[in-house]
């Protein structure tokens, strides 16, 4: 009983969990990628434990610097592979399979009612499927490797309701930027956010993943959509095991209730250097852009690529345009449906699935003084290159911007 | 435990990308992290052992990279005092044995001031005045006292 987080953490800890309680909860699935596994494995070894708690519940995707960008990275990745093999971890997803959060969805580990923990801050993405999912650091991940359990403070929950039909040219990314603009970058710190309302009910799973992905950008511990028919349609045939959905009870207590109506929403752009520095795209149309990036765990799914292609079809980009599909499955579908050809004909570069330059590691890092309009989730100072500016927007805004080499309201093209 | 040092002062929303830029993550060497600590916001950051960071709201927001508190700790910082912390950074700091306290001293100190933190007493002293600071729940204080979660777990076995 209570909020979705209270219900799931209560089940997972074996006793009633109320906001503010500290509980030790069993973890259903644990994910660490090539970036965070290095320190997690180091900490695990130092803990003096020989074997992981359950090799079938640990997922290790290679996505952050994939393929390896230099010998040092290659060596660290080799050591992760050797450790995973020695521990008999079978859910290891190699270079090119895709971004960790996308794979957790595609392979059915992100499931309603489960506790799914990732050594990556955007692990809150799995809340789109009704899981209690959050990000932790490497040492917490080592603790899960060792014991399958972790302590949590049961979060208070903000109830966000979004109503109204999204206007043409306006996407789920615009909805979440609009929400973050109101709640601010730390307004949900230590808290969970539950999403309700007709806009959410009508939203695809890809769109819900975009929403939940960015819960962390308002400080949130989790962002959760209650599972419905769309959720079950997606999960059916993928689920890695049985699951029991969790819902909030009618008498659940929320620390805050915030209602939005998006029927009149404009395309949104988060300007540097904070994600809540959000403007209407039309207000920043004069900003010159050197590179457009369409991809990431936020917006690298098929409907994102298709949305970009709908604007780029039979047109040519005016600035460097990178498209990075979120997974091999997304890339294949883009190839098979002709979306990839549309993007290539427009002058875009399609890179292999993975995180790409989102966190400034490789494959499209910017020079000082350059600016990128990106469909990713962070615009922090120096994130994609020292002295480079990052503006965040939807795939539609990114595509429209690519056509002009300056920020462009996509409604000019839809 | 009492900690005492000179203040390095930063504002709100100090994110993990400025604490340790992504390009330095491809390492398992704590010295590399320490050399580049705070580089994205303050290339002149060269703390003496025991110095203290004082910041505003939402310190450590952003990625889950544990290299962020490691960089700060191994650069010599004895404690981070902020109005509030992002939650993953909060957990990571305790897990790597970096003391952190929430206290509202931001407006009361300048860079270079001497500040003292009494972790057990739950207060911070600066410029002759005393400010209340948060105390950790017992089990988290135990992890911190052990020097981090790895050491705590080894001790338990």
Image (spheres, rainbow, N blue to C red):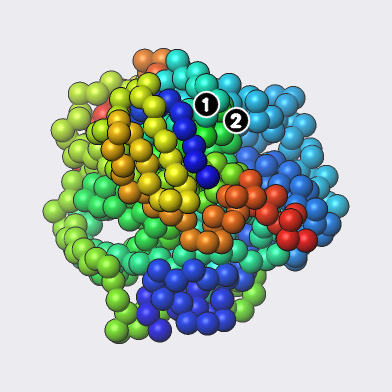
Q: Where is residue A71 in the image (x, y as percent from the top left)?
A: 74, 25
- Quadrant of the rendering where the C terminus of chain A is positioned: top left
Q: Which of A84 and A235 is in front in this view?
A: A84
Q: Mark 1 or mark 2: name the one nearer the start of the chain.
A: 1
Q: Position of residue A47 (x, y in %)?
A: 75, 52
Residue B124 appearing in the image = yes
Q: Tell me the chain of label 2.
A: B
Q: Who's the residue at 42% across and 32% down the image? A: B53
Residue B68 appearing in the image = no
What secondary structure is found at the residue carrying circle 1? loop
Q: Tell me the chain of label 1.
A: B
Lateral position of residue A102 relative to residue A281, left or right: right
Q: Where is residue A371 in the image (x, y as percent from the top left)?
A: 36, 23
Q: Nearer the viewer, residue A48 or B67?
A: A48
Are the numbered discs 1 and 2 placed on the same chain, yes or no? yes
Q: Position of residue A241 (x, y in %)?
A: 64, 75
Q: Who's the residue at 86% across and 52% down the image? A: A86
Q: Who's the residue at 30% across and 65% down the image? A: A158
Q: Who's the residue at 46% across and 20% down the image? A: B45
Give the labeled residue for mark 1: B37
Separation of residues labelled 1 and 2 (CA atoms): 9 Å
- Quadrant of the rendering where the N terminus of chain A is positioned: bottom left
What secondary structure is found at the residue carrying circle 2? helix
Q: Quadrant of residue B157?
A: bottom right
Task: Judge whether A156 appears above or below B103 on screen.
Answer: below
Give the labeled residue for mark 2: B74
Q: Are marks 1 and 2 in contact (CB under 8 Å)?
A: yes
Mark 1 or mark 2, whichever is nearer to me:
2
Q: How many labels does the image show?
A: 2
Label 1 crowd (10 A; few <14 / some 14-19 / many >=20): many
């Amino acid at each position: 009983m209570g909020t979705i987080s209270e219900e799931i953490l209560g089940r997972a800890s074996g006793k009633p969990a109320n906001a503010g309680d500290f509980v030790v909860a069993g973890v259903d699935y644990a994910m660490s990628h090539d970036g965070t596994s290095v320190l997690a494995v180091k900490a695990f070894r130092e803990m003096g434990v020989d074997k992981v708690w359950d090799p079938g519940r640990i997922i290790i995707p290679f996505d952050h610097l994939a393929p390896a960008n230099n010998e040092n990275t290659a060596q660290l990745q080799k050591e992760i592979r050797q450790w995973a093999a020695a521990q008999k971890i079978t859910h290891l997803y190699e270079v090119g399979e895709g971004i960790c959060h996308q794979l957790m969805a595609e392979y059915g580990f992100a499931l309603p009612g489960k506790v799914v923990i990732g050594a990556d801050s955007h692990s809150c993405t799995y809340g789109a499927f009704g899981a209690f999912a959050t990000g932790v650091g490497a040492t917490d991940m080592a603790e899960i490797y060792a014991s399958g359990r972790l302590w949590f403070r049961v979060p208070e929950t903000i109830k966000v309701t979004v109503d109204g039909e999204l206007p043409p040219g306006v996407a789920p990314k615009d909805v979440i930027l609009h929400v973050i603009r109101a709640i601010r970058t730390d307004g949900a710190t230590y808290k969970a956010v539950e999403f309700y309302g007709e806009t959410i009910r009508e939203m695809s799973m890809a769109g819900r993943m975009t929403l939940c992905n960015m819960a962390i950008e308002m400080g949130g511990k989790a962002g959760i959509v209650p599972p419905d028919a769309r959720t079950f349609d997606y999960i059916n045939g993928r689920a890695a095991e049985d699951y029991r959905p969790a819902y909030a009870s009618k008498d659940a207590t929320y620390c805050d209730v915030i209602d939005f109506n998006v029927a009149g929403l404009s395309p949104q752009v988060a300007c540097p250097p904070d994600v809540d520095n959000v403007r209407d795209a039309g207000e920043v149309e004069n900003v010159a852009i050197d590179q457009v990036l369409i991809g990431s765990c936020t917006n690298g799914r098929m409907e994102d690529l298709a949305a970009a292609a709908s604007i780029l079809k039979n047109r040519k980009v005016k600035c460097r345009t990178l498209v990075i599909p979120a997974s091999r499955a997304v890339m294949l579908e883009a190839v098979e449906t002709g979306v990839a050809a549309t993007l290539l004909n427009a002058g875009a570069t399609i890179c292999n699935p993975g995180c790409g330059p989102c966190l400034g590691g490789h494959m499209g890092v910017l020079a000082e003084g350059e600016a990128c309009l990106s469909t990713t989730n962070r615009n922090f100072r120096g994130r994609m290159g020292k002295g480079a500016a990052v503006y965040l927007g939807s795939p539609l805004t990114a595509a429209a911007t690519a056509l002009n080499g300056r920020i462009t309201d996509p409604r000019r093209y839809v | 435990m009492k900690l005492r040092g000179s203040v390095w002062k930063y504002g709100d929303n100090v994110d993990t990308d400025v604490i340790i830029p992504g390009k330095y993550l491809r390492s398992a060497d704590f010295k590399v992290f320490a050399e580049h600590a705070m580089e994205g916001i303050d290339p002149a950051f060269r703390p003496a052992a025991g110095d203290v960071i004082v910041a505003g709201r939402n310190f450590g927001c952003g990625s889950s990279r544990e290299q962020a508190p490691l960089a700060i700790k191994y650069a010599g910082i004895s404690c981070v005092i902020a109005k509030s912390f992002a939650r993953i950074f909060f957990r990571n700091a305790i897990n790597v044995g970096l003391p952190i306290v929430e206290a509202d001293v931001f407006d009361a100190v300048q860079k270079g001031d001497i500040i003292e933190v009494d972790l057990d007493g739950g207060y911070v002293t600066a410029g002759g005045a005393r400010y209340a600071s948060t105390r950790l729940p017992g089990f988290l204080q135990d992890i911190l006292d052990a020097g981090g979660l790895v050491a705590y777990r080894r001790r338990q076995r």
